[in-house]
Image (cartoon, rainbow, N blue to C red):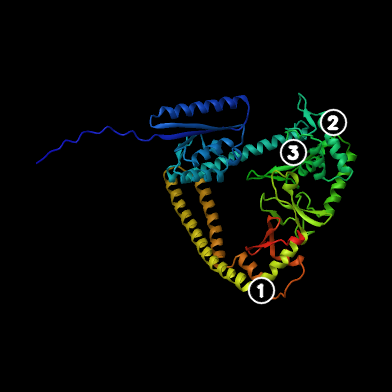
């Protein structure tokens, strides 16, 4: 028998866990700043106290609400570091500090878990590395959102009371004004002269784009040193503050924390003689009439600023370089369409104008190609759509059934939590009711999915196919045909465009040099 000695091995040092922390305070007062500094110091000490942890930084947001994740630079920096593999574990004070929006919170947690990065919520003692905790996380996150909505309502009520009492102060003053020590608007003389020039130019018939060009040529800077644009000029011309009035609650925030223009959905307030005017009310009203006349002439939709269908191409020609919309121009050689980005700043987009007649001729050519070759283009495309739709329909049904099964599993988890004393009867009943409501939606979607197998693209393709089959060779452009079957036009260059059809196909055509 041969016995061989095997020497003991020194343990190999394991790879340290790269741990980061996230902190947030929602206001910029001194107390909150001290709180943020304390949180940062707390997490840095905590992480460095663990010998098997490596400090990966403290990410933070200061003076920012937690209702929307995409508005927080610190959180976005943390997520970027996680996505690029620089972090293994995240610490944060509580769910409400991480996100007050339930959908955002769960989305972020799941994204990080997909990268194998758990989050530890200190206050709730929840580690998302355990998937059983997702239900608890969902409920606690909902509570945080309810708390945020309650705070938001209190803040809105406070603002409303101050507006009604006449003590509310606006935040950032518009161009032409600054603030005194008491927060009241006072005229800034140099900027006020520019405001008067803008209004007088508009009153003399100059368009917003031309006014912006004039200010650029005069080398008059905006307040932040940027470029003047037509939309900036339009915003000035419709702002009641320049004749000394003040409108409150022009916009409002919905339950999902998204802002909307207020068209009467919530109470609004209006104050005359709120501050010193730069222009007279008479001049302001005359300019509004000029703007209204311009809108009627160009058929612009109120409050949206989009051209309606006065011309078939209005709002439908898209720049393939920058994604901007093309606008109609009258030139000495005829009608043309030009990229708005290129018009405002040639350095941002090099795409030049295209001729209206060339686009119409290209559409006629495309229609004729379809007339003679639909059996080789539209018919096979329709068949492939139907096959694809059947597959997608089956996948959708499977997804819905999987969601129903997941809710069944969540009910079981709820019962375990209730029996274990982790949930009171009220929360247990509320969560069961919410799951059952969701199940009703799933069952309705399942019933509709099993009954409906034809999607919008198939219907549009069938409609186009029937139309093409009935056509003779085309010689003239048809507004009706274009509007009915074309979704948009992509401009690749001055000699090449693509017609994006409503059925889903994009057909490329060359622009004739003779009509360029």
Residue at figure coordinates x 27%, y 32% from the top left: 10
Asked if residue 510 lies left or right of residue 51, the reply is: right
Q: Secondary structure at mark 2?
A: loop
Residue indicated by mark 3:
227
Report x, y in % for residue 56.
47, 32
* Position of the C terminus by quadrant: bottom right
Residue at image x 64%, y 38%?
A: 152
Vertical position of residue 188 compared to residue 295: above or below: above
Q: Earlier in the sequence, mark 2 or mark 1?
A: 2
Report the residue that reaches farthest toward the front. 514
Q: Is residue 212 above or below residue 412?
A: above
Residue at the left extreme of this rendering: 1
**Marks 3 and 2, the one that precedes in the sequence:** 3
Question: Can you identify the residue that label 1 sits on?
Answer: 372
Label whose residue precedes the other's in the sequence (1 or 3): 3
In this orientation, does residue 70 appear?
yes
Question: What residue is pinned by disc 2?
Answer: 276
Image coords of residue 131 (percent x, y)? 44, 46
Q: CA distance from mark 1 to mark 3?
A: 50 Å
The residue sitting at 53% across, 64% down in the picture is: 393
């Amino acid at each position: 028998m041969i016995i061989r000695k095997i020497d003991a091995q020194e343990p190999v040092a394991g790879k340290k866990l790269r741990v980061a922390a996230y902190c947030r305070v929602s206001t910029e007062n001194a107390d909150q700043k001290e709180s943020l500094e304390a949180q940062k110091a707390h997490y840095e000490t905590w992480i460095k106290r663990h010998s098997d942890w490596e400090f990966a930084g403290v990410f933070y947001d200061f003076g920012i609400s937690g209702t929307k994740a995409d508005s927080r630079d610190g959180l976005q920096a943390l997520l970027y570091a996680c996505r690029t593999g620089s972090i293994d574990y995240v610490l944060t004070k509580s769910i409400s500090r991480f996100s007050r929006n339930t959908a955002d919170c769960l989305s972020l947690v799941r994204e990080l878990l997909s990268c194998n990065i758990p989050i530890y919520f200190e206050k709730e003692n929840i580690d998302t590395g355990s998937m059983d905790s997702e239900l608890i996380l969902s409920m606690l996150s909902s509570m945080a959102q309810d708390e945020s909505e309650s705070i938001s309502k209190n803040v809105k009520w406070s603002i409303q009371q101050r507006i009604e009492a006449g003590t509310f102060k606006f935040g950032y003053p518009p161009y032409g004004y600054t603030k005194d020590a008491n927060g009241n608007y006072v005229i800034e003389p140099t900027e006020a002269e520019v405001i008067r020039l803008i209004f007088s130019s508009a009153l003399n018939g100059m368009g917003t784009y031309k006014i912006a060009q004039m200010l650029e040529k005069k080398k008059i800077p905006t307040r932040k040193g940027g470029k003047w644009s037509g939309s900036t000029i339009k915003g000035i011309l419709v702002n009641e503050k320049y004749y000394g009035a003040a409108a409150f609650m022009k916009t409002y925030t919905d339950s999902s924390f998204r802002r909307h223009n207020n068209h009467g959905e919530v109470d609004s307030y209006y104050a005359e003689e709120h501050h010193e005017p730069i222009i007279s009310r008479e001049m302001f009203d005359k300019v509004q009439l000029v703007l209204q006349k311009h809108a009627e002439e160009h058929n612009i939709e109120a409050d949206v600023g989009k051209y309606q269908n006065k011309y078939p191409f209005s709002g439908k020609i898209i720049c393939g370089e920058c994604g901007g919309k093309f606008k109609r121009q009258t030139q000495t050689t005829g009608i043309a369409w030009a990229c708005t980005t290129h018009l405002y700043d040639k350095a941002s987009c090099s795409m030049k104008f295209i001729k209206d007649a060339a686009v119409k001729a290209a559409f006629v050519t495309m229609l004729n190609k379809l007339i003679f070759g639909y059996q080789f283009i539209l018919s096979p495309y329709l068949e492939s759509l139907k096959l694809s739709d059947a597959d997608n329909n089956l996948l959708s049904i499977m997804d819905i059934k999987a969601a129903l099964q997941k809710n069944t599993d969540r009910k079981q988890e709820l019962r375990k939590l209730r029996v274990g004393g982790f949930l009171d009867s009220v929360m247990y009943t509320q969560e069961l009711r919410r799951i059952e409501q969701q199940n009703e939606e799933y069952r309705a979607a399942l019933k509709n999915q099993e009954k409906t197998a034809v999607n919008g693209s198939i219907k549009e393709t069938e409609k186009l196919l029937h139309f093409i089959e009935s056509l003779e060779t085309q010689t003239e452009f048809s507004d009706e045909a274009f509007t009915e079957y074309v979704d948009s036009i992509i401009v690749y260059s001055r000699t090449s465009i693509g017609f994006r059809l409503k059925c889903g196909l994009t057909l490329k055509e060359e622009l004739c040099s003779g009509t360029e």
